[in-house]
Structures are given as structure tokens and as C-alpha cells.
Image (cartoon, rainbow, N blue to C red):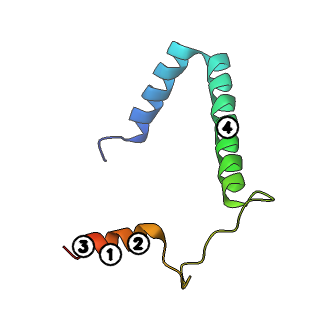
Amino acid sequence: MGIFDWKHWLVILLVVLVLFGGKRLRHIGSDIGEAIKGFRKSVADADTPEPGAPAALDSNDSKPSRLANAVRTSNLD
């Protein structure tokens, strides 16, 4: 058996139940569930572009940016 046998987990669960109580654990579980749902929604919203927002430049754009030009010229020294 490993360091965390099923008996160890049972004792840890009982200690947590005694310390927090069943009602509080239900609230904590629902709060964590709502936080995960909110996180997933924000990630999905971040992936979709906003209407009216400028389109992202393609990496194969033939015109280099000002930053790329500045880096190239500064490295020539």
C-alpha cells in the first residue's frame, strides 16, 4: 500500500466533515462549480472576436510592423 491508502482518505474526509460540516461543504462545492463555469465562459468569450473589432493581422502579412523594423535596425550596430 502507498502512503495514502483508502483508509487515510477516509480519515481525512471525516476530519474535514467534522471541521466544516456538511452544509458548508455543499456551499463550497457549489461556489467552486460556479467559478469553473464562469472561467469557462470567459475563456470562450475571449476566443470569439468582438463585432466591429479590427481583424487580427495574419502572420504571413507582407508588410513588417514598426517594431520588427526597429528591432532589425537596432541589431545592425
Res 75 label: 3
- Do the residues bearing badges 1 and 3 touch, measured as CB atoms within 8 Å? yes
Per the image, the residue denoted by label 1 is 72
Distance from the alpha carbon under mark 1 to that under mark 3: 5 Å
The percent position of residue 24, horizontal first and vertical second, equals 63, 18
Per the image, the residue denoted by label 4 is 33
Q: Secondary structure at mark 1?
A: helix
Three-letter amino acid code at the position of disc 1? Arg
Q: Secondary structure at mark 2?
A: helix
The quadrant the C terminus occupies is bottom left
Badge 2: residue crowd in 10 Å (few <14, some 14–19, many ≥20): few
Distance from the alpha carbon under mark 3 to that under mark 2: 11 Å
Q: Nearer the viewer, residue 59 or 15?
A: 59
Residue plotted at (70% across, 36% down): 34
Distance from the alpha carbon under mark 3 to that under mark 4: 51 Å
Three-letter amino acid code at the position of disc 3? Asn
Vertical side of 18 occupied by 3: above or below: below
Q: Earlier in the sequence, mark 3 or mark 2?
A: 2
Three-letter amino acid code at the position of disc 2? Ala
Q: Quadrant of residue 25?
A: top right
Q: Nearer the viewer, residue 49 or 4?
A: 49
Distance from the alpha carbon under mark 1 to that under mark 4: 49 Å
Badge 4: residue crowd in 10 Å (few <14, some 14–19, many ≥20): few
Of tags 3 and 4, the one toward the viewer is 3
Per the image, the residue denoted by label 2 is 68
Q: Secondary structure at mark 4?
A: helix
- Do the residues bearing badges 2 and 4 touch, measured as CB atoms within 8 Å? no
Q: Earlier in the sequence, mark 1 or mark 4?
A: 4
Vertical side of 49 occupied by 63: above or below: below
Residue plotted at (46% across, 69% down): 66
Vertical side of 25 occupied by 34: above or below: below
